[in-house]
Amino acid sequence: MATPESRGRIALPSGEVGSVWIRPRDAAAALVVAHGAGAGMDHPFLAGFCRAMGEAGVATMRFNFPYIERGRRSPDPERVLRETWLAAFQAASERQDGRGVFAGGKSLGGRIASMCVADGMSAEGLVFLGYPLHAPGKTEKLRAEHLERIPVPMLFLQGTRDPFANPDLLEQVLAKLGDRAVLEPVEGGDHSFRIRGVKADDREIGAALAGSAAPFVRRVAGER
């Protein structure tokens, strides 16, 4: 029987946001997952990923940023995104009671997680579901400097046709991170991991990524 989802609310300095836990019995660790800029925590991609992670023995907590809760399209200011991430991570850590807590997310959500970890958020590791290394067509301005300040293992799940991450530039960035960074390319995948000519819905696409993410989390958690 599938582990049921548990919905809740996370208190913020101003207001609150929704969250969803999937917590299988004897989970190896928990992964807090944030959504991308264009869709909230209940998007099929993220829901499918989290469900598959639970089936693989990793608990997940996904959450909304405030702008999604308010029905807006434009992301909140960086300060608000960071505050929300820190509150979500704290809520997950309290529920885990000392067991390992990882952080990550889709695109924007993963990037903000990495910024928080670079500045001291105590995640055991990071899982990126499409890291937005640069804006499409703007490879001269990389969002990478802070990654060198992250001391924990990082998994980069990345489509090879992702316009937000030129493969050659990404490899150059990850080379500087040494063995802290692991790259799992999805051949032909775009920023949403869709592959031309392959029929799959977003839930299936997200679930497939758990095949790489869950072993990474379990391995790192086992090394604690």
Image: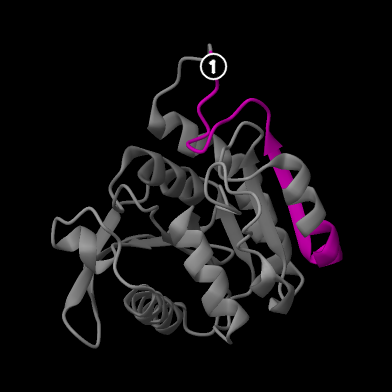
Dot 1 falls on a residue whose secondary structure is loop
| Neighbour tally class for label 1: few under 14, some 14-19, many 20 plus, Cα within 10 Å | few
162 lies left or right of 170: left
Q: Which residues are magenta?
A: 174-196
Which amino acid type corresponds to the residue marked 1 in the rendered image? Arg
Residue 190 position in % (x across, y down): 54, 32
Residue 91 is one of the magenta-drawn residues:
no
Q: Is residue 46 visible?
A: yes
- Please identify the quarter of the rendering in which residue 126 is found: bottom right
In this rendered view, identify the residue nearer to me: 50 or 158: 158
156 lies left or right of 19: right
Which residue appears at 58% of the width and 48% of the height? 138
Extreme-top residue of the structure:
197
Residue 185 is one of the magenta-drawn residues:
yes
Which residue position is annotated with label 1? 196
Image position of 68 with respect to 159: above or below: below
Residue 118 position in % (x across, y down): 62, 79
Image position of 180 with respect to 50: above or below: below
79 lies left or right of 125: left
**Which quadrant, please, contains the N terminus?**
top left
- Please identify the quarter of the rendering in which residue 204 is found: top left
Q: How is the image coloured?
A: one colour
Which residue appears at 58% of the width and 37% of the height? 162
Residue 220 position in % (x across, y down): 72, 65
